Image: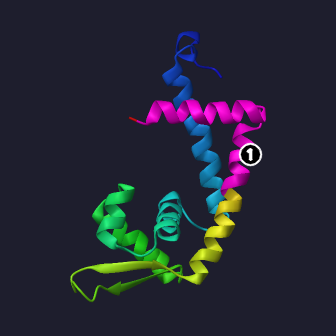
Amino acid sequence: MDAPKRLQGLASWRLSAAALVGDRLVNEALATEGVRKYHFRVLVALSDDGPLSQAELGRRLAIDRSDMAAVAAELEQRALLERTRDDRDRRRNVVTITSEGQAALARMDDAIKAAQTTLLAPLSSAEQRQLNELLGRLIEP
C-alpha cells in the first residue's frame, strides 16, 4: 500500500481497506452471474426466511423502497423471484424465490465462497476463524 504510514497504523483504515478488497472480489464474483449485491441479498433473505412482503424485505435489508422495487422487478424479469398480491392486503406484494432463483443462488454462493477464499488466503484456517469472530464482536451491539 502506498498510503502514509500513520494511516496504515489505524485499525479503522485497515478495516476499510480490507472491506474495499472484499467488496471488489464479491462484485466480481457476482458479476459472473450477472447480478449485484442487492440481488444476492434479496435472494438470500427469501431463501433463508421464505416469502416476505416487498416492503418488509426492503426494511430488513436496509434497501430503499424505490431501489427495492427496481431490484425485485429485475429479479422477477429473470424469473428468479415472483411477486404476487397479498390476499389479506391487496396493497402489498408478497415476494417469493423461484426454483430458478434457488439454482442461481446456489451458483452465487459458490462464487461468493471462492471470493472469500481469495480474500482470506493469506490467513491460516485458525486465523480466519479468529478474524471472523473478532469482526463479529466489532459489529454486534
Q: Find out whether residue 132 is within the magenta segment.
A: yes
Report the predominant secondary structure element of the magenta stretch.
helix
Q: Nearer the viewer, residue 11 or 136?
A: 136
Q: Find out whether residue 111 is within the magenta segment.
A: no
Q: Nearer the viewer, residue 101 or 14?
A: 101
Q: Position of residue 35 (x, y in %)?
A: 56, 66
Question: Which region is colored magenta?
Answer: 112-140
Q: Residue at x 56, y 38 (%)?
A: 20
Figure quadrant of the N terminus: top right
Left or right of residue 76: residue 35: right
Kindly tell me whether residue 80 is visible in this rendering: yes
Q: What residue sits right under mark 1 in the picture?
A: 117
Q: Residue at x 53, y 63 (%)?
A: 40
Q: Residue furthest top?
A: 6
As drawn, 7 above or below 29:
above
As drawn, 117 above or below 42:
above
Q: Position of residue 50 (x, y in %)?
A: 46, 73
Query: At label 1, which amino acid type do we have?
Result: Thr
